[in-house]
Image (cartoon, grey):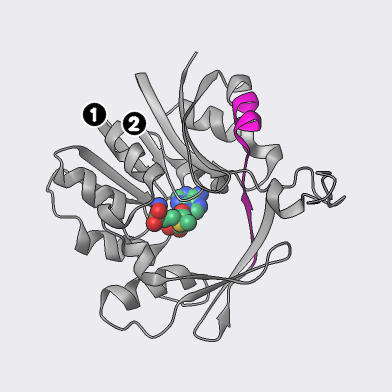
Amino acid sequence: MDIESDLYGNALVDFHQGNYSEDITVLSTTMEDDVMPLPYLFRSYDQMPALEKKALLLSTGTVLDVGAGAGSHSLYLESNGLTITALDQSPGAITVLKERLKSPDSKIVLESIWEHKEKYDTILLLMNGTGIFEKLSRATSSLENLKNLLNENGQILIDSSDLRFLYEDEEDGGLWVDPSKEYYGEVTFSLQYKGIESASFDWLYMDFELLKTHAQKAGLKADLVQKGEHYDYLARLTKI
Ligand SMILES: C[S@@+](CC[C@H](N)C(=O)[O-])C[C@H]1O[C@@H](n2cnc3c(N)ncnc32)[C@H](O)[C@@H]1O
């Protein structure tokens, strides 16, 4: 596996095989450099933030874990008897998922979500689930595509954050706006690991009201399930 094209997957494989030497550094044009600790990507239920625990408790029936990564959420759900499909476009993540998931009923799929065609009762998108929409201009069509993967009475459980705190003027409450962006939640990231930097990629954060508007355009009703500790939230989307 070529490390440059799947830096994140390589880091997951290293950690899983006991070769943990460093964390992933997350670089972006809009935020300060950040660290993505590899152990966090292998978190147990007890180590998860409250919003993720809530999403797992609300999951029912057949579940699609979109961008499953190292499979923390899938692992918990399969051990609670749910039928899981763990999907990720990273070959390294798939290698790890194949070793971590144990139930013979669990399916592991190496694919972009935008290619996927099966239907589910619950679609789970966690750790800033709106990220895979990439740009605000793609939000409605992405939500329509997800809606097409829902069984009748199915639900999408998705988390995100309102990034306005990054741009808000503490004194007058005004927003500093980057004119090159359609919306302040549009971020361009790249990852760094073992001295190699990945290609940059777009990752979208959406405040709840904006998600609600785009969900409605896609024929989905959005309910705010729970707010997190820092501008983050969990939403539940169902067909109108
Ligand atoms: C921030 S990580 C979250 C991983 C995991 N859900 C967790 O909470 O630990 C995002 C994941 O989404 C995957 N991903 C990004 N875009 C995707 C796409 N279009 N289709 C499928 N997987 C995607 C990445 O490979 C990565 O594993």
The question of residue 238 being in magenta is answered with no
The question of residue 209 being in magenta is answered with yes
* Of pointers 1 and 2, the one earlier in the residue sequence: 1
Q: Residue 102, image x and y in percent?
A: 14, 54
Q: Residue 52, image x and y in percent?
A: 37, 45
Out of 122 and 23, give the one closest to the viewer: 23
Out of 235 and 187, give the one closest to the viewer: 235
Out of 196 and 77, give the one closest to the viewer: 77
Residue 89 visible in the shown view: no
Q: Which residue is mark 2?
A: 122
Assign ligand 1 to one image quadrant. bottom left
27 relative to 169, above or below: below
Residue 66 visible in the shown view: yes
The quadrant in which residue 174 appears is top right
- Amino acid type indicated by mark 2: Thr
Span highlighted in magenta in the image = 200-214
Q: Identify the residue at the far front of this view.
A: 171
The quadrant in which residue 69 appears is bottom left
